[in-house]
Amino acid sequence: MTKYRIVALALVGASMLACFGGGEVKTDAAEAQLESGDLAGAQSTYDGLAKDHPDAVNVAVGEAYMQMLAGQYDAADKTLQSVEDKAGDAVGEIKLRRALVALRSGNLDDVKKYGKESGLPAGQVMAAEVHLADAEVDDAITLLKEAKSDPGDVGSTAQTYLTMLESGDALQAGLAEATALWAVGQRGVACEVAEEIVKALPDNGDKGEQLLLWAGRAVTSGRSGIATSLLDELDLVGAPQGQEWRVQATRGLVFIAEGQNDEGIARFKALDAAIDAGFAPWQGVADATATAAALTQDKPTARALLQGSEGVPAARGLYAAGAGKLARNAAPNDSVFASFLENK
């Protein structure tokens, strides 16, 4: 299910602009500012373009994106709505973007409405996920059957949902609903729904992978108790082959989330040794450590976790923990995130 969510987020990002990049109004300067991390500059440029060209669809799309990044969801939706009658054959893309704005704002009724109205597979899957989150399974299946013909990741996601829902297995159907809850942003609830379902899965399938997946989701969603419960079950089942390091990393995340900082730091330092011994991947551990730093509100703990670390994940973790100066030092000079930090 993660592939679809990546597709959806990509549509809110660079491709949101690229689809309309060939419009009559040049937006190159704003797009360059956005790509360099100069959000304030991009916002100012788009504001000026929107004032001078209120009917330009590509300008409205860029302006709505900046409004969404600023948390101005109502304004972003109104901006997109204002150009629907000018978008021609691309009106479905505008509807999809309205659904994505609604998803960011938590307005699930509008996700359902605009996802359907878009007529696009991605919108249909988004609407289906809301139907599933509302326990409206038949409505979800109808939309998923329409979306499964898409040849890419969206169609694959639709088919995965359908396979689970039509399996005749109550556990698989329940897991599909939990996954949909996660996808539409109701993450704590999703973990609560998934806990007993995943623990009840048969041992001869992918139970271990599901336990580990949902334990990670739970700890990053403020449900560390659920994460511990799932990890304890995983100890009985056994970790997926080659994933023992992920189990230890998730345990470390639980320690950090619960304020047991010394224990969490020790767990991640042990993972550093596992990297040196060839038992854990450097990038995976780096990402997990950055996540741990983002979970803590304690700057000394964040520093201890990421001491000597460089790269965007480390910088993001430090920034989330409130260590802005250290974040800038960790971010590569040529990265968008470094530009973002400099323009704060």
Image: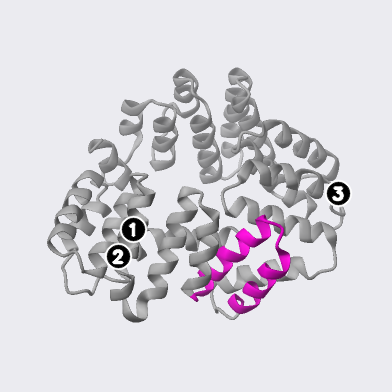
Indicate the secondary structure of the residue bearing disc 2.
Answer: loop
Q: Earlier in the sequence, mark 1 or mark 3?
A: 1
Residue 125 lies, in percent from the top left, at: 58, 67
Q: Earlier in the sequence, mark 2 or mark 3?
A: 2
Q: CA distance from mark 2 to mark 1?
A: 6 Å
- Residue bearing mark 2: 82
Residue 342 lies, in percent from the top left, at: 24, 36
Residue 198 lies, in percent from the top left, at: 79, 49
> Between residues 263 and 48, which one lies in front from this camera angle?
48
Indicate the secondary structure of the residue bearing disc 1.
Answer: helix
Which secondary structure class fits the magenta region best? helix
Q: Which residues are magenta?
A: 119-148
Q: Residue at x 84, y 53 (%)?
A: 201
Q: Residue at x 80, y 49 (%)?
A: 197
State the count of labels: 3
Q: CA distance from mark 2 to mark 3?
A: 49 Å
- Residue bearing mark 1: 78
Q: Is residue 54 visible?
A: yes
> Between residues 71 and 262, which one lies in front from this camera angle?
71
Q: Residue at x 42, y 74 (%)?
A: 92
Q: Is residue 135 magenta?
A: yes
- Residue bearing mark 3: 200
Q: CA distance from mark 1 to mark 3?
A: 46 Å
Question: Mark 3 is on which residue type?
Answer: Ala
